[in-house]
Amino acid sequence: MASASALAKLYRASFRANGVVLGDAREYVPGDDVRFINWKVTARMGSPFVDGIVADRGNDIIFAVDVSASMQFSSRNRSKISLVADVVSAVARLAEINGDRVGLVAFSDAIEKFLAPRIASKIFRYAIARLACGDRRLQTNVLGALRFLSGTIKKQSVIVLCCDTFGLSIGRKSILAQLRMLKLKHEVILITATDDNDMPPAGIGKITTEDAETGDIFDIDTDDSVAMEKVRSKYSAYENLIDGDLSKLGINNFRINSKDSAESALFALLA
């Protein structure tokens, strides 16, 4: 297991405080954060000066978590939503150690739960533990969740959107436009949960499958190599399209897989 100090260091680097209160400038020393260089004083004095930090008001970190049916899918012992819940719980503990506040928006095609930012409490931890216990028929409305965040979260915050690729496929352009608006005020991070069997494996014959969110039933011939290649190619191309869109917005997309341990997924997010 990774040491608490190593995780805390990674956390502080990834979730930088946005509520600092700056004091008088002082001369730069190696190791100072270059973000706090006072360029006016530096130009006047002819050597680097940085603003001193008088106080740090801490971050508000808002986890927006998709709890729809597709997130409850699992081909192993853990579902996508279960892994996300473990990662969110771990980040919340690190936030508490660092004096940051955490909030939660659990959504499907409606807002299922909203907890305003606070120092992680028993209520927050209970809500996280309950994320994986939702209705398996719930559908996804990522756009609705993003609009809720825009209208509700007024203080500059770190917003961590947790969903899967399927959630981003419904109204992609509108979702990207809303993410762009959020990014104007907040730091936005995306965690995309995946499972190796989000698509059925090839070579197992004809199967009947069910759309986890809509309940629609359809047949797939996994022995049809041409058809399966089209499915894989389309899925891969869509993932690449999403990555490109997010990159243009300056939003990091961290993919985690249900086969991952919570620790490895946490390091992928914080590293």
Image (cartoon, rainbow, N blue to C red):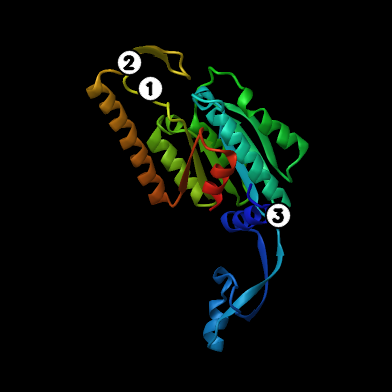
Residue 134 occupies which quadrant of the picture?
top right
Task: Give the residue at mark 2.
Answer: 220
Q: Which labelled disc corresponds to residue 98?
A: 3
Element assignment for label 3: loop
Residue 34 occupies which quadrant of the picture?
bottom right
Which comes sooner in the sequence, label 3 or label 2? 3
Q: Residues within 10 Å of mark 1 (few under 14, many from 20)?
A: some
Residue 38: % across, % down: 57, 76
Q: Which residue occupies the extreme front position in the image?
A: 1
Nearest the viewer among 138 and 24 is: 138
Q: Which residue: 46% across, 30% down?
A: 195
Element assignment for label 2: strand
Q: Residues within 10 Å of mark 2 (few under 14, many from 20)?
A: some
Q: Which amino acid, mark 2?
A: Ile
Determine whether, in the image, residue 175 is placed left or right of residue 224.
Answer: right
Residue 101: % across, % down: 70, 48
Q: Which amino acid, mark 3?
A: Asn
Task: Give the residue at mark 1.
Answer: 200
Which comes sooner in the sequence, label 3 or label 1? 3
Q: Which residue: 70% across, 54% down?
A: 98
Q: Is residue 93 above or below residue 20?
A: above
Element assignment for label 1: loop
Instruction: Tell me whether circle 1 and circle 2 mark residues in contact (CB < 8 Å).
Output: yes
